[in-house]
Amino acid sequence: MSTAPVRVSVRREIAGADIADIAGRFGTPVYVYDADTIRRRCRDLAAWDTVRFAQKACSNLAVLALVRRAGVLVDAVSTGEIHRALAAGYAPHAAPGAAGPQDLPPAHPIVYTADIFDRDSLDAVVRHGIHVNCGSADMLEQLAARMPGASVTLRVNPGFGHGHSQKTNTGGEGSKHGIWHEDIPEVLRRAEWAGLSVSGLHMHIGSGTDLAHLAEVAGALERVAREIGRSLTTISAGGGLPVPYKPGEEHADLGGYFALWDATRKTLEADFGHRIRLEIEPGRYLTAESGFVVTEVRAVKRQGGRKYVLVDAGFNTLARPVLYGSYHPMSLCPADGHASPEPEEVAVGGPLCESGDIFTQADGGFVATRSLPAAQVGDLLVIEVAGAYGFVMASNYNSKPLPAEVLVDGGTARLVRARQTPEDLTRGETV
Ligand code: LLP
């Protein structure tokens, strides 16, 4: 069974940089990001007062610095992500008394969003004075004890959610995320008792959802905002913006989505009598399409009636297919002298000692096939739309080093993270 319409895809360059040259210089497998695509995706969202990058999607320092220069702020979910944001040049907090344009309240350059503080993240938030988006009421007292009088954002679970997979649905009873919407009165009492003010309200119902589901959030947020009242100065629509992965999928209508949220913001501004900052918090949207995994074909073989192309990247490199049955487009960069070949149906797998190490699989782990130009050992296979939740979810399974990361800007490819070495793999271990 084919998972996609026939698509003979040969690709020899990424944003003007020669793929064979990248593989020769940096080795394979390698993540390659196109800086211009990231910049374009940042510009797409310019209508929003704040675009806050959910860096969990792609947190390489060069990518963070690039989105920072494009005017995008950042979300952090761990001490490590706070460290990355600071290292990429983000200020820990807004300058005291700073107002945004048109009397908007100042934006927090970094927001820590989580359902818990582990001990080191609480230390980091306090040490740097970072604004917190609380997904559990227990965080309120823990923060108040260390940062008396702080203002916080509440992440509220509106009682419904949706994602591309049940594993990425972050709303409703089936999700651990956020403060349950019915608990708001009690949570507000706890915040007041702890001496914290609630300046922000945030909802994120899931990742890889669609605009129809996302649109339901605006109404739910408006209801909760009224319960919180005039202390609110910022509302966040969360992330979840979809991107096209499969042939035939299209970009969402961002203009319509912004208009919906802008109307919600204006209603609340009229009710509260002051300006409200409107934030969006995309991860996937900003980086997915910019990213490619370049990998080398190392074996081509037949198992009964099925043909397998085995490459040097596995689910240690890109985990989304094995985790969610996710579809990633693929193309072939034939080695020198190997003409553009005819398409054939193949399953594509990696080097790991586990049968799930297949890039062409459907949800449930069933091996599927893809129509690809006939590949030979030495060709490069390019896995596309891999710039979000790609490298960041890579692992050292089977003691495989993490791949290198390369940024292409102005046609020039630059190494932005060195490939791990075998020595890196055993660092910190003792015999
Ligand atoms: N805000 C919060 C609080 C989040 O938890 C997330 C994603 C985002 C924003 C960004 O969502 P996005 O715009 O990227 O959909 N590993 C999965 C995705 C997990 C998303 C986790 N949270 C995947 O590969 O599809």
Image: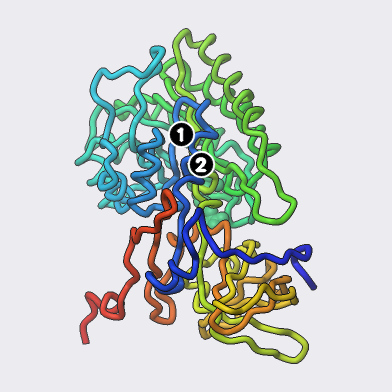
Asked which quadrant contains residue 394, the reply is bottom left
Q: Which percent across, then down, holds residue 17?
A: 47, 59
Q: Can residue 184 be seen in this view?
A: no
- First reached walking from the N terminus: tag 2 or tag 1: 1
Q: Under tag 2, what secondary structure? A: loop
Q: Under tag 1, what secondary structure? A: strand
- Mark 2: few/some/many CA within 10 Å (<14, 14-19, 20+): many
Side of 202 relative to 141 (left or right): right
Q: Mark 2 points at which residue?
A: 282
Q: Does the residue labelled 1 lie within 8 Å of ligand 1?
A: no
* Residue drawn 28% across the image and 28% down it: 94
Relative to 280, say whether 209 is above or below: below
Relative to 24, say whether 57 is above or below: above
Asked whether 305 or 13 is in front, the reply is 13
- Mark 1: few/some/many CA within 10 Å (<14, 14-19, 20+): many
Could you give the CA–CA distance between mark 2 and mark 1, rounded to whole angstroms?
7 Å
Label pair 2/1, CB-CB below 8 angstroms: yes
Residue furthest to the bottom: 304
Indicate the amino acid at tag 1. Answer: Val
Asked whether 314 or 159 is in front, the reply is 314
Quadrant placement of the N terminus: bottom right
Q: Name the residue under label 1.
A: 51
How many numbered marks have been drawn onto this rendered protein structure?
2
* Residue drawn 51% across the image and 13% down it: 269
Relative to 80, say whether 355 is above or below: below
Name the disc covering residue 370, or none.
Answer: none
Q: Which percent across, then down, holds residue 228?
A: 47, 22
